[in-house]
Image: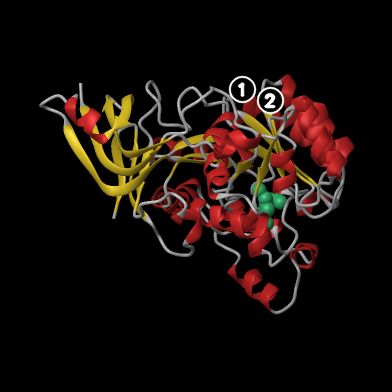
Amino acid sequence: MKTLAVLHASQLVTLAGAPRPRVGPEMRELRIVANGGMLLRDGIIVATGSSDEIARSVPADAELVDAGGRVVLPGFVDAHAHPVFAGNRVDEFEMRTLGASYEEIAAAGGGIQSTVRKTRAATEAELEQQALTHLQRFVACGTTTLEAKSGYGLSVEDELKILRVIRSVAARSPLEIVPTFLGAHAIPAEFDGDVERYAALVIDEMLPLVAAGGLAEYCDIFCEQGYFDIATARQILEAAKSHGLALRMHVDQLTNSGGASLAAEVGAATADHLEQTDADGIAALKRANVQPVLLPGSVYALGKTRYPRARDMIDAGLAVVLSTDFNPGSSPTQSIPMVLSLAATQMKVTPAEGVTSTTVNAACSLNRFDEIGSLEPGKLANFSIFDCDDYRELAYFFGIPQTHAVYVCGVEAFRV
Ligand code: NIG
Ligand code: FE
């Protein structure tokens, strides 16, 4: 039995409370213990309290972690990311600075398709190597659980290849990884816009293999003009459900196609992006208890200005989640603190609401609230120590690393 005591946290941000997503004013209740501490045994939290209290109950053979007056938070849970791909899109990034739009670049054969070409050409070992480098940066920013989507293969063989890479890097990285099948990310070039024929491939060949191999927990889809329309999305998502997969969806990112309402209709766990979602869409999400996953990094990096209506969503009682959307095209960042900064400055989400959105609420959206998302007895000892003495500094400072150390199941995964 290995015992660890974390002492002298200026703030132990526990987020203790009801085992369910936090909504409305609850999103500002972080249950902070000033000068806090924690006792951990075999990777599980045994007690939280004041540092003095914890110090009194520490067994003689315990290992001590001195937080040194820094802030301690639950490990961030990043509920939307695309971490497995080959190459990058720095050339397109430069084209956008010169005036081309994301949509124009995609229409000219760039965008998702250009990453698909490179990813198909890469070996599993190459993809693993690149993904592990990306994953290490998530950990360095304080993330301990990551949702990981396929979606840059778009053929039976290449989608399975990516899902196998996700599985193998999960075993080699300290991050806990939740796999999502995103075969319906775009219509591959060789299908020449024949969405029906590609949807049939996804439904008849990909989904059965993904489900039989236990390669994904969730199925996602890019519901957007020029990608998958509402009717096709419905078909694919219903098929995914019949294979036992739960649903997440990319909706209303570039245009409002009624994707939020479809997410409500099919009972998706989450509806993600929502930049163009209106009051009707918000009401539909509320009626069906779908969690919105907001991705301000993708708005920022595409140089757009229309952020999702986070305040309206919080005020409507939705259990908002914030995530990075890490991918090579629209959101090349692994940093949840950067997302907290964008959420505060661009969407008027308070730092406390931001922390709730990236811990407890994100954990609920991945059906993992029993184990992660807050610092409470019985949960995994996944936590980060940040170089500040007030948690709000995580959203206030931007573009600089503030992580001091990260622990997963009580084991050090990162330290400056
Ligand atoms: O979430 N919108 C679709 N998928 C990604 C972008 C993918 C890419 O450009 O490679 C997103 O923004
Ligand atoms: Fe995405």
Q: According to the image, label 2 marks what residue?
A: 208
Quadrant into which the N terminus falls: top left
Disc marking residue 212: 1
Asked if residue 179 can be seen in this view, the reply is: no
Residue type indicated by callout 2: Pro
Instruction: Tell me what residue is drawn at x 31 percent, y 49 percent.
Output: 70
Disc marking residue 64: none
Looking at the picture, tell me which residue is in the foreground, 104 or 382: 382
Q: Position of residue 289 (x, y in %)?
A: 73, 28
Q: Which residue is the extreme one toward the right?
A: 231
Relative to 20, 200 lies left or right: right
Instruction: Tell me what residue is drawn at x 84 percent, y 53 percent.
Output: 255
Q: Position of residue 50 (x, y in %)?
A: 29, 33
Q: Position of residue 362 (x, y in %)?
A: 57, 36
Q: Are marks 1 and 2 in contact (CB under 8 Å)?
A: yes
Q: Residues within 10 Å of mark 2 (few under 14, many from 20)?
A: some
